[in-house]
Amino acid sequence: MNVLVTGSSRGIGRAIAARLAVPGGQVVINYLQDQDAAEQSAAAVAAAGATAHLVQANVRSEADLKRLAGVLDRVDVLVHNAAIGALKPFDQLRTAHWDLTLESSLRPFWLLTKLCPLAEGAAVIGISSLGSRSFVPGYAAMGAAKAGIEALTRQLAVELAPRRIRVNTVCGGLVDTDALRHFPEGPAMVQAALARTPLGRLGTPADIAAAVALLASPDAAWITGQTLVADGGYSLI
C-alpha cells in the first residue's frame, strides 16, 4: 500500500504514517523544517516493514505539492494532515495570518488531491477538529479552514466516486500534542475538556490515527463524503 501523509514529521501526522505503514508498502513523510523529527517518523515506518520517503515540502507552494505528488507512481491513501495557522481573535488577525492558515490547511486538500496519481479505489482523508463547528478561542481562521475541509470532503466524494475513490475526514476533539502549547487558553481548554468528555481523557495521536486507518480500510468501502467525529463524546454534552 502506497501512502502519502502531509505534515507527518511529528504528532498526529507521525502516528498516522506509522499506523498506515505495512510490510512492503511505501509511505511519503512530508515535513517543512524539522528533518530530525521526520527521520524519527521514517524510523517508525521502517519498523513496520514499509519504505519511508522523506520529502521536505511547503504545502503552501504549488511547485512543492507537484514535487510531493510525484514521489510515488500510485497513491492508495492520501491523508491531508498539515496545518499551520495563526491563533488570534478575528480582529487581531492580519490578512497574512488568514492567508497562511487557509493556504496551509484548506488549499492543499483540494490541490494535492488533484495532483496525486490516485489509484482507482483509493482513500483520501482530511483531518479536521471541533473548531470547525463550535467556538474555540483564537480559532477564527483555523476554524474556517477546518470547516472548509469538511465541506470539500463532500464535494470531492461525489466528483471522485466514478473512480471509486472515497473521500472522508476525521474531526478530532482535543488531542494531547505539542500544538496545545500554542493555544492562547491551552491549560484552561485542557481542564474544560477533561471535565466535559464522557470518556474522561484527552485524545492521543494514536486515537486519530486509528480513525484514519478505519476510513482507509476495506471495512469502510461503503463510506464516503462523511466526517467522522473522534472526541471521546465531548461534542455530545
Image (cartoon, grey):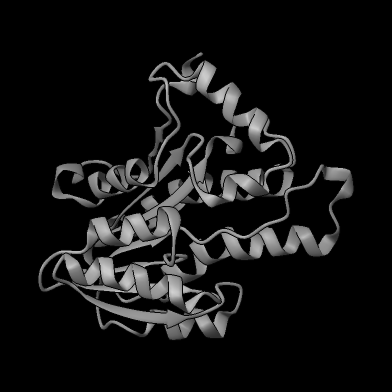
Decide if residue 106 is on the left or right side of residue 232.
Answer: right
> Which of the 4 image quadrants contains residue 85?
bottom right
Q: Residue at x 39, y 47 (%)?
A: 205
Q: Please indicate whether residue 99 sits to the left or right of residue 16 in the image.
A: right
Q: Position of residue 173 (x, y in %)?
A: 48, 34
Task: Specify whether 51 is left or right of 174.
Answer: left
Q: Is residue 63 visible?
A: yes
Look at the image and tell me whether residue 1 can be seen: no
Q: Percent from the top left, x then y, of residue 15?
A: 34, 55
Q: Residue 6: x percent and y percent?
A: 44, 66
Asked which quadrant contains residue 189, the reply is top right
Q: Quadrant of the N terminus?
A: bottom left
- Report the residue at 41% width, 73% height from top: 38
Residue farthest left in this picture:
23
Residue 115 picture location, percent across and down: 42, 76
Decide which of 122, 33 is in the foreground and name it: 33
In the displayed structure, 133 sits above or below 54; it is above
The residue nearer to you, when weighing 162 against 116, is 116
Question: What residue appears at the point 21 percent right and 64 percent down from the top-left corner?
Answer: 21
Seen in the picture, residue 18 relative to 31 is either above or below; the reply is above
Of all residues, the one furthest to the right in this rendering is 91
